[in-house]
Amino acid sequence: MLLHTAYVLWIYCTVQQSSEASDGVEFHADFTVEQGDNMARHYSTKDFFRQMPNALLARYFAGRAVFGEFNFATMSETRHDELFTAWLALPEAQRNTMDAEFHDIFEMSCEKGCHAILDEAKWHLDQDADPNAANAFSEKLAALVNHFERAMVTYLDHNLFWRGATHFYHADTLSHWRKRKNLPHNAAQVDTTSTQALANRIRTYFHHTEGRGNNCVVEPFRRGDLDYFFAYPEDYSQQSPEWVNGQFGIRPHNPAFEVIFVYSQSEGKLDLNYRGSYKAIEPLQAMFAETILQLPELPPDPKDSRVYDLGPLRQRNFEFTYELGSGIESVVVKKLRLSSRATKGERISLEADTSQDPQAVYALLDRIQAAMPMAQYSVTQVDLAVTMVVEADRPPKTVNIHITYPNSCSLKYDELGLKLRDMLSASGIEPREPTDLATPDAPTVHVPTPTPALVE
């Protein structure tokens, strides 16, 4: 079962107070709706029937010995009223099982899902006696009409690839990865003994520190040059309102939470995704190093000294660089945060409506600079809005990028995120060692009389 993201409404409230007036308090609230990668596409069973070719629906249902009375060859490809009526008449348990499978197939029916399928297939087929097996599979999928067909054909005819592909797809949708560099280039041990040792260490840690994790399983997968390890410790027992066979009730269940490790032997780097206490990050990294990399202990973590040089973004005439075929149409600075180099903790945030004037933030900066000293302030955070074509047959969408000094960036390492990282790199906005950085922010002209600042 794929894990699905959801809409999250974040409410950001900041209180801004004048340094010269005790009652000069302003209340400012930003409402931002963040949309998970999957939720942009709405699933319903009826729409799934319409989007999936009848021939593939017939094969799927034949494998489950249902709807043998329907002639799918003569059925309309776009109207499935009779099929849907028969679907609703199926026993609830049988229908729920198939609906969950349909939902997973739907999730994989996109470009990112297709890439995940090809990655998992390549690992299996590269070990095939036929050296052209991987290319033949890729060409088979490419010849199909759309991603719905590609996902269903994989599910029906190449189910061996399905589980790994859905895991990769899910990992590609996640953000907030924790990185550990400069590990020895040891090969990852993927045998049962090693993965079970990791599972036991995770189980023991969470059971001792948080009172959960009574059970744990670890599943290893290979993707190109990367080793993925998906760990599923048992979470706290929960109760949820459910319908079962027409009866409503509050039923207990034992969900799992998730820990994902992605290891690059060639780079000596470990990426970790865990949505929990920050205190668990280093212990989890140590468990991986000791059980999977067979190290006596986790090596010391040399801090990542690379930093973003955001100074050039202070200039109104800064130009972003990107390839014509990237799909990017425009890049606009939506927000700048300036931090004082003289007074610790003193920051100024400039945010403006750029929908009508792409230079609105810089117009606001000009007004601030004309009223207060700014020479001792450096850019430490920037929000960008990128308008780009993500899917050829869809209108352009806006992708927001949040970059914070010294080296934090909100972009994922999926296909879209890599395109945008290429744009930032081509524009000179990428983490570099301090010795490689450009000169600091150029001094700005100012008058000596300050006015109240918009300090966060």
Image (cartoon, rainbow, N blue to C red):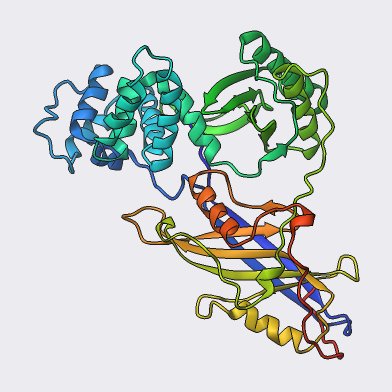
Q: Is residue 91 visible?
A: no
Q: Residue sitting at 33 percent across and 21 percent down?
A: 132
What's the residue at 65%, 20% (across, down)? 188
Closer to the camera, 396 or 301?
Answer: 301
> Is 249 left or right of 362, judged from the image as shown?
left
Within the image, what quadrant is residue 159 found in?
top left
Residue at image point 52% right, 28% down: 223
The foreground one among 189 and 8 is 189
Question: Which x, y percent locates residue 428?
Answer: 63, 61
Question: Residue 388: x and y, percent?
Answer: 44, 61
Q: Is residue 387 above or below residue 160?
A: below
Q: Measured along the vertical axis of the image, is residue 319 above or below residue 134? A: below
User: Residue 285: x, y in percent?
Assistant: 75, 29
Q: Is 432 displayed left or right of 246 in the figure?
A: right
Q: Quadrant of the C terminus?
A: bottom right
Q: Residue furthest left?
A: 74
